[in-house]
Each structure stands twice: as C-alpha cells, then as structure tokens.
Image: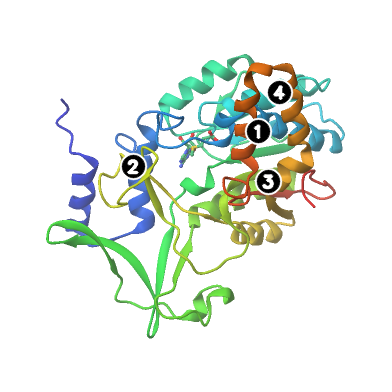
C-alpha cells in the first residue's frame, strides 16, 4: 500500500490551506491529477467501464471519420505530407477504423503523420498496440505539430475538459466554488459578484438562479489548434454532446459504472463531464478566420451513408444483423445519441466539409 495521500485528502488540504477552489480546478485535479486522476488511472471505456463511446459501439463510426478526412485531404490537393491529430483517442478504435478506410485512398498513408494527444498511460498502451503500424507520435503539447496541413479529430474529448460555473444573484453573477462544510466538500458561491456585462450577451437578462458554464480549457484548445489550422490549412472535427449556442443551463455530470454519482464524492474514481458549448468554439474559430459548421450526429452519419453501410454490413454478416441494427439505432436515433451528440467542424479557407447541410 502506498503512503501517498488520497486525491480526496489532497483536495481537502488545498482547500484548508488556500480557501475554496473553482469547479475547473476541482475537475482538473479529479480528472488528470498525474497520480490519481480519473483519466490517468485505468481504462474507463467500454461496456464494463463507466461509459461506452460511439467508436466502441460500431466500426461504422470510425470508418465515416476516415472517409471524411480523406475527402478534406483530396480537397486540399492530396498534400504529400500532412498531420492527422486525434485528441483523446481512447483505445485507438476510431483511428484504427478510420485508417482502414483511408488506406484505400492512394498516397494517403504515405503522406500521413499520425499524432495522438492523450493523458492516460493505460490507453496510450492500447493506442500503441492498435496503431503501432502507423508510427504514431504522442505530443505533450496539444499544438506541437509539423509545418504541414493539419486535420484534427476529437470524439468525446471536449466534454472532459474543466468548466467554471457562475450563478446569477441579485446584483451580478457569482462563481460556484468548492469548499468544506462540516469537514465535507460542498458547493458554495464566491461572495464577489461579476457584473452581467462581463458575460456573453446571450446570458444578459437571465432569471435569478440561472447557471452559466464556461470552459476556458476548451476555448484554449480551439484557439491553439485553430491558429495552426488557419496557418497550415486543414480542419478540426469534434463530436460530442453539447449545444449550438452559448446559453444558461447546468450540465455538469458525474458517472460511475453507467450510473449518475455525486460529483464531489470520490474524485479520481468518477467521470466528470459537461456539455460542450459549440457556440463558444465557433466564436473562437471564426475569430481565426476558420469556417465553423454544426450538425447532429444523426444527420452527419445519414448524409455520409450510414443506413446504406449498415445494410451492406448486415448482408455480408447475416449472423450480426441484430447487432448492426442495434448499433445503427444507438448512434442515430433521437432517443439515443442521434441529436444529443453534435458534429462540429472548423475548416480553413475554401474547404467544404462533407456531412453538413
Ligand atoms: C471520453 S474518452 C473518449 C475516448 C475516445 N475518443 C472514444 O471516443 O472512445 C476521453 C479521452 O480523452 C482523454 N483525455 C481526457 N482529458 C484529457 C486531457 N486533458 N488531455 C489529454 N487527453 C485527455 C482520455 O484519456 C480519453 O482517451
């Protein structure tokens, strides 16, 4: 047994020493603390883990991402050298499926520099096993890329980045903080109000008690990658649960073994996430001269031909008909991932991303 203090104890010590911490600081420690963070510990993915993601549901998902990237590469005139960067690649399943399809485009694999951005050592090992043949490179800085066209893919990455929350009071907005009450972690509000004018216009005139969430980490990632894309040419594709326009609403959630949990209990052992504000990402992208586009996962996959692909797969694998139908439903039905999940693209100059209206 290690004598190192638990993550809970470390967080409480910090609060006792320096006062309440922001939700972003708490999430950062709970998710990516180098020794005890949720994403630095074991593999949280899959049916036996805390959640299951689209590429783990069906190979079709990654295949369409591969098809999408090849199309952008072709629109750019098939550059002889380019970077494909995946943020938070999980088990490497999406990229494995994508590159199996992309390899059919002549010259694509020869021109490919595969780069992965990942914090979890256990998942890095799985990525190495699945993608080793493509000689991936794990950068420690999100935007440390070569001077080549850049394509970025991120499935369920942005929802894992920390958010701050602000609650509307009688005379302004107050940041929600985490402190100790009777020795237990509890939410409270900063006594110092932030004037409403400092918040995006969409929040003005919200009713008292309204909650505004902002992810500075997501905006920073978009800014750094978007700057490289606008300099080098290419695009970013992010798929996640989220909303189209900046708005009030509380979306922080904690999941443990497929069930909701208390976000303040057992940090490091639960998945904490929040819906992605795609409006905020679009604002950053537009400011860099990129073209943003947004659609639902259902429409994106339908436009790329998932219904036809599912029936072709079912024909070729009669024993799998039910599994394939279930996967199609899970990915596209409005009661499942179909409309909750959005697909966001930010592309350079003249590129026309496929799958959007
Ligand atoms: C919800 S999982 C999604 C995995 C994969 N994209 C999929 O769809 O199956 C989030 C991924 O992002 C990684 N991750 C989370 N926070 C990160 C961070 N701050 N820096 C780098 N990787 C991170 C996790 O380890 C994991 O690989």
Residue 86: which quarter of the image? top right
Above or below: residue 268 compared with residue 62: below
Toward the left, the furthest residue is 182
User: In front: mark 4 or mark 3?
Assistant: 4
Q: Secondary structure at mark 1?
A: helix
Q: How many marks?
A: 4
In the rendered image, which quarter contains the N terminus? Answer: top left
25 vs 111, left or right, is: left
Instruction: Name the residue tied to disc 4.
Output: 314
- Judging depth in this view, the residue of 107 and 42 nearest the camera is 42
Give me the disc on residue 112. none
Q: Earlier in the sequence, mark 4 or mark 3?
A: 3
Picture coordinates of residue 46, whole percent (x, y): 46, 30
User: In front: mark 4 or mark 2?
Assistant: 4
Instruction: Name the residue tied to disc 1.
Output: 61
- Judging depth in this view, the residue of 190 and 344 nearest the camera is 344
Q: Earlier in the sequence, mark 4 or mark 1?
A: 1
| Residue drawn at (70%, 52%) of the image | 295
User: In front: mark 1 or mark 3?
Assistant: 3
Q: CA distance from mark 1 to mark 3?
A: 11 Å
| Residue drawn at (42%, 31%) of the image | 120
User: In front: mark 3 or mark 2?
Assistant: 3
Q: CA distance from mark 4 to mark 2?
A: 36 Å
Instruction: Name the residue tied to disc 2.
Output: 270
Task: Report crowding for label 2: few under 14, some 14 to 19, many 20 or more residues within 10 A (C-alpha).
Answer: many
Q: CA distance from mark 4 to mark 3?
A: 19 Å
166 vs 228, left or right, is: left
Instruction: Name the residue tied to disc 3.
Output: 298
Picture coordinates of residue 19, whole percent (x, y): 22, 62
User: In front: mark 4 or mark 1?
Assistant: 4
- Judging depth in this view, the residue of 69 and 198 nearest the camera is 69
């Amino acid at each position: 047994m290690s004598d190192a203090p638990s993550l809970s104890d470390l967080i409480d010590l910090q609060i006792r020493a320096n006062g309440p911490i922001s939700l972003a600081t708490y999430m950062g420690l709970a998710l990516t603390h180098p020794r005890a963070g949720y994403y630095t510990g074991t593999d949280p993915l899959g049916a036996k883990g805390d959640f299951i993601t689209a590429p783990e549901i069906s190979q079709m998902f990654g295949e369409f991402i591969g098809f999408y990237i090849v199309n952008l590469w072709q629109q750019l005139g098939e550059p002889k050298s380019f970077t494909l960067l995946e943020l938070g690649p999980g088990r490497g399943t999406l990229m494995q499926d994508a590159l199996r399809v992309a390899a059919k485009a002549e010259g694509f694999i020869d021109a490919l520099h595969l780069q992965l951005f990942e914090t979890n050592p256990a998942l890095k090992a799985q990525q190495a096993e699945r993608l080793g043949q493509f000689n991936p490179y794990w950068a420690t800085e999100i935007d440390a890329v070569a001077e080549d066209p850049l394509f970025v893919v991120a499935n369920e990455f942005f929802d894992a980045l920390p958010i701050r929350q602000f609650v509307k009071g009688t005379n302004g907005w107050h940041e929600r903080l985490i402190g100790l009450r009777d020795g237990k972690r509890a939410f409270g509000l900063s006594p110092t109000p932030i004037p409403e004018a400092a918040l995006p216009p969409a929040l003005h005139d919200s009713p008292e008690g309204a909650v505004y969430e902002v992810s500075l980490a997501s905006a920073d990632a978009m800014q750094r990658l978007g700057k490289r894309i606008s300099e080098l040419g290419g695009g970013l594709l992010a798929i996640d649960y989220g909303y189209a326009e900046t708005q009030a609403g509380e979306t922080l959630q904690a999941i443990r073994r497929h069930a909701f949990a208390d976000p303040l209990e057992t940090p490091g052992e639960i998945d904490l996430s929040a819906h992605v504000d795609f409006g905020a990402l679009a604002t950053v992208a537009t400011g860099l001269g990129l073209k943003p586009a947004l659609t639902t996962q259902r429409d994106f996959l339908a436009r790329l031909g998932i219904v036809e692909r599912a029936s072709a797969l079912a024909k070729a694998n009669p024993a799998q008909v039910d599994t394939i139908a279930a996967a199609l439903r899970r990915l596209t039905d409005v009661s499942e991932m179909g409309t909750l999940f959005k697909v966001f693209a930010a592309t350079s100059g003249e590129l026309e991303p496929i799958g959007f209206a």
